[in-house]
Image: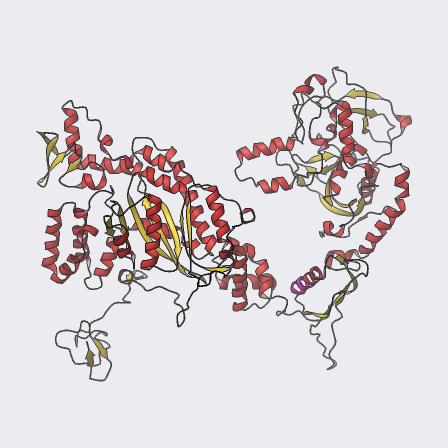
């Protein structure tokens, strides 16, 4: 009787683990009773599957498949033709099928058995449309022999090795190739009709893994000995950018030569035979005396494996069986723990030492007849052999009599964290409630909110890395970034240490400015930077300081960033000092900064760059103004004061505010107009921005990375900048014209307004330009200036300047188009040069160079304030007024004045009869009482 056996059910088992240590034993998954669909996207439909275990490649032959098919009921008196094919591991049905009709094909199959223990075999019934039988491992050495047999026998084709040279003769068309390899060959019935196989012009080739090349010698010198799968994969790589190259390399066995997949015509004949012998097929050859001597050892091995397969039902339905081996007691305990969770049984550890482990079930058994407690019979015992390191199951009772429970001790947060890593990696912000419901549905257990929270935290720690441990790797990360990005500045500041011999240093702050960003900023020709800070959450909170520039298309261009302990004078001074060194800024540099007037930033800029222009964000000025003066009227007047481009109009707008409210006028007058009004800007930055929206936009982009550990946080910002530069560069390639798209749009609007103006030449390159609404200005084309000051502020000709340029052109003056008068920072060439400097990628953590600094970085010291930490930030006045509930404005955060008593804090309906306060109730606080009120100022 054959040692193999057909598995009783269709459940899959881990054959790789089951056959560990037995390189020649494997299993087959038989696909039978169906048929193949057409190429491409070939599938096997309308068929069944059966698993066949305990096959030995040393003794395996085609006759074994014949016996399997006979046992499955496919060989009967109808003489149905059967065609056998096997699928190369990790291959597909379009290109991975190979013939399984001869010993040579079995040799080919044997090359995969050592590394792949489950082979798929497909059966075709009646006829075949595949060409696997015409593509043997060496097509130039194959001759097809037709056997004429009596009607009782079916036609059979077999492959026979032919060492005779191939003659170039015309070959009759071969319409069908049939092979019924389960019949024994009868030499007496063979009438040798030989014809050579030439597939040079085979038009209906379905791409099953081989070239359409001929075996003729005249083509040998030009043929390439490459596997056809590589050709197909290369085409896929070209057309499919989502190809996973890691999976591609996993599909290739470096120690296996692909005999059936390439043309070897350019290799000499002796070398070809030698190459076939190099493949590890010695164990596949039979008939030698050494093989006969090993038959006893082989039979003992098969019997040992048979002992593990004595109970087929146990193999399928139970994860344990007698003689099952484990590499360590830890692996055994893990499997028992998993079984406890899957079956929802309370399995506990009863014996645990260096040589033995015993688990028993402590479940509750219902017994209505007696009050005696009955124990569940489920038990498993695993121990280690005296002379072996493997652990083997020696006692196993699989029966459970206890009730299932929804509280299993093995289902702790550590187990849950290991099984939700992929979920957390995909959605790190999944709510605890949603995650808990998902886990309860999956495991059918009661999982508490706290257990889910701890499991999520553990999974986040696995995905993002430990917050504290990343500080020890921070210097290695810095070396990698600097090695891949030349001229990159990275500075790490640590706390001062009184004892220099201490081997640790406490992290304080880090500053990063990538070399490519320095060169790109210089190419942008726009000396303007926005400065801002954003909160860093987590166990080590801090601030992310950033310096963001504007490109020629008014897009954000992050230049430098830092992670500091907080926004203080010291941290801003340190950040701006490093930034000044990278940009070459001195104390007399005429640079332009914009900020929200953060704490410590104003004195830092005044100290380091006293000649620089420092603008304040107008939105934050308005927020402060709304604390005392609210309403659209004040907002519109503030905006008019800020947006006027000349001093005369600025003073007129300020007088309007003074007439409306003198206190608001005096308050706004205290803020230097050079910091918030366009009329007082110098124009050196070629930008008239009034708000710091560029930094706000950047902070919103890095919001997801600010909560991560230190390396993940910095790497998130670097990767965002890297991707942004590439994406913008792609958009630049689509743009045509001399200017950027934004500059072109702005200039087009200016041109439409300039059509209403008339320019009068006054000599010396000056023009008097007049238009509607008594708008008249002086334009100096040579100096590129206008008394409206718009040209100097933005670097783009104003409507008066465009009218003057057009007048010069109409008077035959060679001045060019208005686009030629735009500042170079808006040129398309400058924009393209700015994004031509790319941020280089870096290697993974395992390939980082170790830092030579002997000290170890520790996380920063963080003082936890008293009380529960705030989950929500303080809402500003603007957000309070804009709060909307449903379709109406909410009355939350608003003061209410009573119409009866004129007091603040209640309305007429809830008035208790408080006495009215002379002079109004604004700013007063009331104490509730019946008929009496008490106010304090």
Extent of the magenta region: 336-341
Please tell me in which quadrant of the rendered image residue 413 appears.
bottom right
Q: Quadrant of the C terminus?
A: bottom left
Describe residue 718's horizontal placement relative to residue 48 as left or right. left
Q: Is residue 425 magenta?
A: no
> Residue 706 appears at what percent x and percent y?
42, 55
Q: Residue at x 55, y 63 (%)?
A: 455
**Lateral position of residue 97 relative to residue 449, left or right:** right
Task: Decide whether the magenta segment is chiefly helix, strand or loop.
Answer: helix
Q: Residue at x 72, y 28 (%)?
A: 135
Q: For this rendering, which residue is in front, 756 or 884?
A: 756
Image position, residue 265 (x, y; %): 71, 23
Quadrant hosting residue 277: top right
- Residue pictured at 23% horizontal, 48% vertical: 611
Would residue 32 be visible to someone looking at this image? Answer: no
Give the percent coordinates (x, y) of residue 527.
28, 43
Q: Is residue 47 above or below residue 236?
A: below
Residue 111 visible here: yes
Depth check, front residue: 823 or 57: 823
Residue 200 appears left or right of 896: right
- Locate residue 476, reporting x and y percent: 51, 50
Q: Residue at x 18, y 34 (%)?
A: 784
């Amino acid at each position: 009787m054959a040692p193999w056996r057909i598995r009783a059910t269709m459940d899959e088992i881990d054959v790789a683990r089951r056959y560990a240590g037995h390189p020649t034993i494997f299993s087959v998954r038989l696909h039978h009773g169906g048929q193949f669909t057409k190429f491409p996207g070939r599938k096997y439909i309308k068929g069944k599957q059966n698993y066949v275990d305990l096959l030995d490649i040393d003794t395996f032959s085609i006759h074994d498949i014949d016996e399997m098919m006979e046992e499955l009921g496919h060989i009967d008196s109808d003489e149905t033709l059967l065609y056998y094919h096997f699928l190369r591991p990790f291959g597909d049905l379009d290109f991975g099928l190979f013939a399984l009709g001869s010993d040579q094909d079995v040799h080919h199959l044997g090359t995969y058995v050592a590394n792949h223990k489950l082979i798929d075999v497909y059966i075709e019934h009646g006829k075949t449309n595949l060409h696997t039988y015409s593509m043997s491992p060496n097509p130039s050495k194959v001759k097809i022999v037709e056997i004429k047999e009596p009607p009782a026998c079916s036609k059979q084709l077999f492959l026979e090795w032919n060492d005779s040279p191939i003659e170039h003769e015309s070959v009759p068309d071969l319409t069908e190739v049939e092979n019924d390899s389960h019949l024994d060959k009868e030499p007496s019935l063979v009438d040798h009709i030989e014809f050579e196989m030439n597939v040079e012009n085979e038009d209906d080739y379905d791409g099953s893994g081989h070239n359409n090349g001929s075996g003729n010698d005249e083509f040998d010198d030009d043929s390439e000995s490459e596997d056809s799968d590589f050709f197909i994969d290369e085409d896929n790589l070209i057309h499919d950018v989502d190809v996973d190259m890691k999976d591609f390399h996993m599909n290739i066995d470096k120690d296996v030569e692909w005999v059936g997949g390439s043309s070897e015509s350019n290799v000499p004949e002796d070398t070809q035979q030698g190459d076939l012998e190099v493949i590890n097929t010695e164990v596949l050859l039979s008939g030698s005396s050494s093989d006969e001597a090993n038959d006893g050892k082989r039979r003992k091995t098969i019997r040992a494996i048979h002992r593990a397969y004595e109970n087929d039902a146990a193999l399928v339905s139970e994860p344990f069986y007698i003689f099952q081996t484990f590499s360590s007691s830890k692996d055994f305990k893990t499997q028992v723990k998993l079984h406890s969770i899957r079956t929802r049984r309370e399995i506990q550890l009863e014996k645990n030492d260096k040589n033995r482990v015993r688990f028993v079930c402590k479940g509750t058994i219902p017994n209505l007849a007696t009050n005696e407690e009955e124990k569940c019979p489920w038990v498993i015992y695993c121990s280690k052999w005296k002379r072996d390191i493997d652990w083997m199951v020696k006692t196993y009772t699989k029966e459970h009599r206890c009730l299932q429970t929804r509280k299993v001790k093995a289902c702790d947060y550590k187990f849950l964290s290991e099984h939700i890593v992929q979920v957390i990696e995909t959605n790190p912000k999944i709510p605890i409630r949603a995650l808990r419901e998902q886990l309860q549905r999956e495991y059918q257990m009661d999982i508490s909110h706290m257990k889910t929270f701890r499991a999520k935290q553990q999974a986040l720690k696995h995905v993002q890395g430990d917050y504290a441990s990343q500080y020890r790797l921070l210097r290695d990360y810095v070396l990698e970034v600097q090695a891949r990005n030349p001229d990159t500045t990275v500075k790490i500041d640590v706390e001062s240490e009184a004892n220099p011999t201490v081997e640790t240093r406490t992290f304080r702050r880090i500053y990063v400015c990538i070399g490519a960003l320095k060169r790109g900023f210089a190419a942008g020709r726009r000396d303007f930077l926005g400065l801002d800070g954003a909160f860093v959450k987590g166990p080590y909170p801090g601030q992310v300081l950033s310096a963001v520039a504007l490109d020629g298309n008014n897009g954000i261009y992050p230049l430098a960033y830092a992670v500091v302990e907080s926004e203080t004078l010291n941290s801003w001074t340190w950040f701006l000092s490093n930034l000044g060194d990278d940009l070459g800024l001195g104390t007399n540099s005429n640079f332009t900064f914009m900020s929200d007037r953060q704490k410590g930033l104003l004195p830092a800029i005044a100290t380091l760059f006293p000649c620089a222009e420092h603008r304040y964000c107008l939105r934050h000025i308005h927020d402060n103004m709304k604390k005392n003066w609210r309403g659209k009227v004040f907002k519109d007047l503030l905006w008019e004061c800020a947006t006027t481009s000349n001093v005369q109009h600025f003073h007129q707008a300020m007088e309007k505010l003074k007439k409306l409210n003198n206190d608001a006028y005096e308050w706004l007058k205290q803020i230097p107009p050079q910091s918030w009004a366009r009329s007082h800007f110098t124009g050196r930055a070629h930008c008239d921005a009034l708000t710091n929206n560029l930094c706000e936009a950047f902070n919103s982009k890095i919001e997801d990375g600010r909560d991560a550990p230190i390396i993940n946080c910095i790497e998130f910002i670097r990767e965002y900048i890297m991707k942004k530069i590439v994406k913008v560069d792609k958009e630049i390639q689509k743009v045509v014209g001399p200017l950027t798209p934004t500059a072109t749009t702005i200039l087009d609007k200016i041109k439409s307004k300039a059509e209403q103006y008339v320019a009068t030449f006054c000599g010396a390159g000056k023009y008097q330009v007049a238009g509607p609404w008594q708008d008249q200005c002086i334009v100096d084309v040579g100096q590129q200036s206008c008394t409206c000051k718009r040209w100097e502020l933005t670097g783009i000709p104003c409507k008066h300047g465009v009218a003057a340029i057009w007048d010069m052109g109409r008077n035959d003056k060679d001045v060019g188009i208005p686009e030629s008068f735009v500042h170079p920072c808006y040129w398309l060439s400058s924009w393209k040069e700015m994004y031509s400097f790319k941020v280089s990628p870096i290697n993974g953590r395992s390939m980082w160079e170790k830092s030579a600094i002997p000290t170890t970085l520790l996380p920063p010291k963080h003082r936890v304030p008293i009380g529960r930490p705030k989950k929500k930030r303080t809402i500003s006045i603007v957000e309070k007024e804009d709060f909307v509930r449903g379709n109406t404005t909410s009355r939350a955060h608003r003061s209410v004045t009573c119409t009866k008593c004129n007091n603040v804090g209640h309305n007429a309906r809830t008035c208790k009869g408080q006495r009215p306060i002379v002079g109004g109730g604004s700013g007063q606080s009331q104490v509730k009482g019946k008929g009496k009120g008490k106010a304090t100022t």
